[in-house]
Image: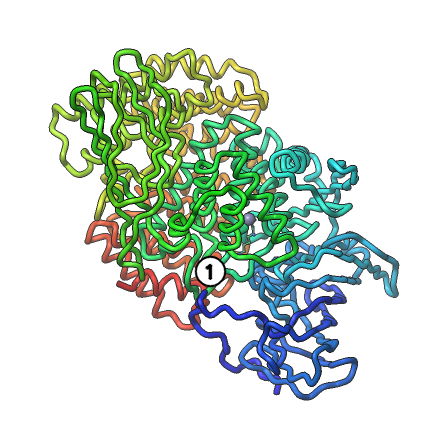
Amino acid sequence: MNDLSNPPAVPSVILRSDYRAPDWLVPEIALDFALSLDATRVRADLTVARNPAGQAGAPLRLNGDGIAARTVLVDGKSHNDWEMDGHDLVIALPADAHVVTIETALNPVANTQLSGLYASSGMLCTQCEAEGFRRITFFPDRPDVLSVYTVRMSGSAADFPVLLSNGNPVAQGTGPGGTHWAQWFDPWPKPSYLFALVAGDLVATRDSFTTRSGRKVDLAIYVRAGDESRTGHAMRSLIASMAWDEQVYGREYDLDLFNIVAVSDFNAGAMENKGLNVFNTRYILADPETATDGDYDAVEGVVAHEYFHNWSGNRVTCRDWFQLSLKEGFTVLRDQQFSADRGSAPVKRIEDVRVLRAAQFPEDSGPLAHPIRPDSYQEISNFYTATVYNKGAEVIRMMTVLAGPERFRAGTDLYFDRHDGEAATCEDFVRAIEDGTGLDLAQFRRWYEQAGTPRVDVALAHASDTVTLTLRQTVPSTPGQPDKLPMVIPLRTALFDRATGTHGGEHLLVLTETEQSFTFTGFAQAPVLSINRGFSAPVAIANPTTNDDLVFLAAHDDDPFARYEAMQQLVVQHLVAAVKGELTEADRTAGRAAIVGAFHAVLTDLALDDLMRGELVILPGEGYLAEQIAQVDPVAIRNEREALKGWLGAALRDEWIALHDRTSAVPFSLDAEARGARKLKTQALVYLAPADPAEAAARAKAQYDAADNMTDRQGALMVLCGLDRPERGAALADFQTRFAGNMLVIDKWFSLQAGSLHRDVIGQVRALANHADFTLTNPNRVRSLYMAFAANLGAFHAADGSGYRIIGDLIATLDPINGSIAARFVPSLGRWRKIEPARAALMRAELERIAALPGLSRDVREQVSKSLEG
Ligand code: B3K
Ligand code: ZN
């Protein structure tokens, strides 16, 4: 009857079209945990009721994963009419409402998957999204079953002085044998994925926030003793988020308590459990000595993101996991808007687009491409992707472009109002935006259906005083979607007068057909086109433009993103032609001269602030460049890009040195000016390094030694890591000793070496994998070494395949420990179709080797098989 060895009854492919309402609802659940690190007992009392919308007479199906029911009671009596169906427990029930009681036993320290209830440095914590709750107790573990939770927990008062769960604490006391207990009650019905429990020896930093209707909310951030001094930035970010969501979206917090706990061992960045957010320490802890400016921004963004989920995710949740972008895309947009309001909006936009291009565009053009609302999955954990998150945010951002901010707000007000307390769909969201804004989004819905990055080809013709702009869109075929229909593509556009450097107003061109022409009159001369300003649509624009026009836009465009984009295009056009062998010597000279001229203008333009200047001098990334070329040789990209950097370093040597001197004199502060100076300080070294390694190493060492903050220190060490100079070893050794024991900083030490430009990264990564501080059981540490390596195209794509072998071995060894993290490394190998044939064969062979391994996790199996399929 109770047979865990049965094959799972779960079908291998889950289809969106198969959705059926649940047969049973669970309006209430009471959980009682007897906590211990290696033997926790869980009793769950489920108040179940037949769902009138479900299938009449259906039994109660409760999902489980790797757990056994020690007791099954129905209405307090033992009940024999149940069976295991794979991992699910199926109970036949006579009436329409019952109380079902189930006891399970768990071993948290043995839970290396970090899903469900697990141990992290002596504390206990949970991660339930997406399907972790079923590793704790049997339950209809699907987001459309919402329950009111009462949670009681007891355990050793010495080991677990702090006992937390969702909602509000309602009772506590002491028990026998040095134990104590606490009871929590969360009045808001929620799906099981939002359940959380934390027990451990933690210290809290406290503050409070009074909502606009006068509710005083107690705020606490729990960390391990010693880390309290690094919670200030997270707390300030939380308070700012709470105020911002009231002002910008009219959303108020709804409990008396908001707790955050920081955990060192965590698969994701953070988790929005109702009233009890659990965070990766990486997105909570920050002080100037140990966190870079980028880390500060990441803490602010993730704290805001999780807080914003309280409405976009928790109050309105997802009907099923195909709707994930309903909460994630929208919440990413909200956190991006918040960060834009907190700092420099143009710089934030540039950073967000850089992330989209680096992480999402490759997804969209590879074997794992999927729409922001997928149609099928095997393992949902594989769908927490840049497509669902970042492209999902871009799709909703386009609605803001089409509607304008006020009408968009009317749409979101209607959405929250209409679906509060419900498990909703992406379709519900789109309809609410339509009803609230008056937009017709019928064709726009294709953004939810079609995968692939649309490409827009641009042609501009000028005759007498008329300009004709012809735009042609193509949406590439993607796995399972060979034919695509035209999308709605909103393009903010301006036509610049070459003589004055100005334009007569921006146009919003909305492309809806495969090909459309737009005409403009009053142009005696052909204008310079600025298109997709602000990156108003997540598309690739194909608009071959002369170097002169790009230099013009880089200097004159009044849209800061467009200015950045012109700089990027100038370099992309040059490097892509160089890698393809299409540059004549004359082209190369002319291209370099144009790029040097544009850089010189940026370095000397007094109207620019340093934060923006720092963006404009960042070269397009290797991954983004690789995207532009079919069957690319990634090492050729590395070499051409480095050669250009060396050229810029030499041609502008005096400017870089002056810049390094100027910025080095700016004292540390967290204001924009000082941050801009720090960004440029390291950029100057980045360009000097290939041009004059001795000078760069000396300056980097001086920057390292003088550093009173992690931005300068990490920047200097990054540059040194790429150089074969004596200063390299000395700085690495100092860094390791100085920050010994600080896990987050030692992660940086691993990343900087694995991601460096040094010629022997492969040898270094192999050595680091055997370093005493390396472990496969901590996801941050695994990512710090191997994600940095897999993103280091020049090293990962070593011609002999040794880089692929390193990642293949990692996947094989990590999979039994933590399958969902192991699966994250498959896409780097899965891109073989875009790589030149010799390397592609080696990448494919590595995937085939993994595919042949017995007992692969569903996570890795799905990613590997999709990567190998035609
Ligand atoms: N919702 C969580 C993601 C959980 C990941 C589960 N594999 C974090 C976030 O997006 O806010
Ligand atoms: Zn999220």
Instruction: Indicate the position of residue 700 as horizontal and vertical percent values.
Output: 43, 24
Instruction: Indicate the position of residue 139 as horizontal and vertical percent values.
Output: 64, 70
Instruction: Indicate the position of residue 599 as horizontal and vertical percent values.
Output: 32, 19
Model colouring: rainbow
- Please report the residue visible at 59 percent of the width from the left and 74 percent of the height from the top: 54
Q: Is residue 207 visible?
A: no
Local crowd at mark 1 within 10 Å, few (<14), some, or many (≥20)? some
Kind of element beneath mark 1 = helix
Nearer to the camera, 15 or 344: 15
In the depicted structure, whether residue 55 falls above or below residue 785? below
Q: Which residue is mark 1?
A: 814
Question: Image quarter for residue 627?
Answer: top left
Question: Image quarter for residue 693?
Answer: top left
Assign the N terminus to one quadrant of the image.
bottom right
| Residue type at the position of mark 1 | Leu
Nearer to the camera, 369 or 103: 369
- Please report the residue visible at 30 percent of the width from the left and 63 percent of the height from the top: 868
